[in-house]
Amino acid sequence: MNLFQDMKESIANVLSQEMEEMVSTQQPGWSLERPFYTDPAIFDADLEKIFLRGWLCAGHTCRIPKPGDYFTYAVGNESIIFIRDHEEKVHALFNVCRHRGSRICIQESGSARKLVCPYHQWVYNADGSLMKARHMPEDFDGANFGLHRSHCRVAEGLIFTCLAETAPDFASFERDIVPRLKPYALEQVKIGHSRQYEVRANWKLIVENSRECYHCGPGHPQYCRAVGFAAAIDSPRAAEEDSRISDERRENLKRLGIDSSSIPFDPEGWHHCRRFFLRNGFVTESMDGKPVAPVLGRLTDRNVGVLAVVGLPNLLLEVSGDYAMLMRVSPVSSVLTRIEMDWLVHPDASEGTDYEVDRLTAFWRLTAEQDWKLCEDNQLGVNSSWYQPGPYAPDERGVKHFVQWYLKQLIQS
């Protein structure tokens, strides 16, 4: 082993020991210490231990409807090409030419008969195999120079990838979540609208914000007018209403053959889901409660509440009867996060006739942008030398669960 490798391993061991000590001294039920939200070294550990090891939702297959269509997904220094081949299979390929390492797909999305490196024009098939390498010697074996592959699974149209050499279990997601998504036929939807945000906050503050509604009363008055459990936090009368409505609608879903049970948080797992119900007068997550798009899938009743699916570390999916909001969280730096949002609608829905983009997106654009402001203000406060961790309220148990999961991932070898 050379001196450089010795030094690299020695530094890694010191950092690992410091990380374990910080995790071991973390007070249960309290927010994280300041370095977890600000320190570039911990951010690097987040990438290595979490984002480069777990299952990440990269997007939806409707982004690549035809053979040759592709899009790229970036996390840390990595870029993955998702491309559909002529047999309709989706491949996940590292966006790194096997010649001298150039990025191959420079654009975020497009369509290509073959993947051609812009540097020296090595040509690859959609499955990553090398098709042509210009002016290489006769004894060059192209079979050994295909693009490196990332693990790829498709579930109800959702594309997941894992960048690690060995991927964790995915069968539990297929068992727990896929049957609950089936009635919506999400594998057949199309994108009604997409939007990206750059949020000046650590990715964990954004995930934590999404895991609690303690802030909803003052932070999301419009959301609370629509969502029963959110209104119930600050109003006993709303809590009574939500309980009654939930009982009635669960019975109706039972008659419709729709599973309304939850998959609870498991610190050993990476996904969970719940169904919640909207207040009287709301049949979807819209500003006025009225439908904004044609009903999804095989649903015969719009009033099915909302199915919320969480896939740690980066997925939030909320499915109403007429559209789905798909959100992905991607860390850029210790204090910057990229958010991608898609609004998914029935494949036959026509913009301008069956839905208007402003009405379709208004509810979640408002809610999300309110959250981004809260998260950015949170980050500014955490940056202060006067920041100290504080105790979680009972209504923040979802944050407590996330932090429990996060710390466990961080110290795994």
Image (tube, grey):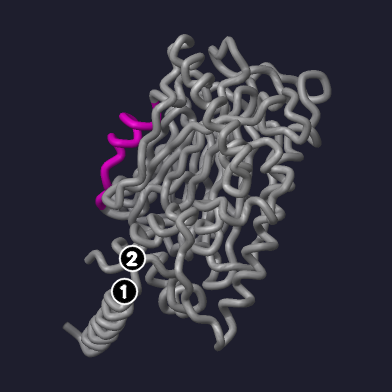
Residue type at the position of mark 2 = Leu
Q: Is residue 95 visible?
A: no
Q: Residue at x 57, y 55 (%)?
A: 214
Q: Residue at x 63, y 51 (%)?
A: 216
Q: Residue at x 65, y 56 (%)?
A: 371
Name the quadrant containing residue 11: bottom left
How far from the left and from the top, in percent, is residue 316? 52, 44
How far from the left and from the top, in percent, is residue 30? 42, 69
Of mark 2 and mark 1, the one earlier in the sequence is 1
Q: Residue at x 45, y 21 (%)?
A: 182
Q: Secondary structure at mark 2?
A: helix
How far from the left and from the top, in percent, is residue 135? 44, 54
CA distance for labels 2 and 1: 6 Å
Image position of 342 with respect to 333: above or below: above
Answer left or right for 191 relative to 82.
right
The circle drawn on residue 23 is 1
Span highlighted in magenta in the image:
166-178
**Within 10 Å of the Cα at label 1, are there few (<14), some (14-19), or many (20+) other Cα atoms?**
some
Q: Nearer the viewer, residue 132 or 26?
A: 26
Magenta includes 177? yes
Magenta includes 206? no
Name the quadrant containing residue 188: top right
Q: Is residue 359 visible?
A: yes
Q: Nearer the viewer, residue 262 or 124?
A: 262
Image position of 397 with respect to 285: above or below: below
The circle drawn on residue 87 is none
Q: Nearer the viewer, residue 177 or 258?
A: 258
Give the labeled residue for mark 2. 407
How far from the left and from the top, in percent, is residue 19? 31, 78
Residue type at the position of mark 1 = Val
Name the image quarter holding the N terminus. Answer: bottom left
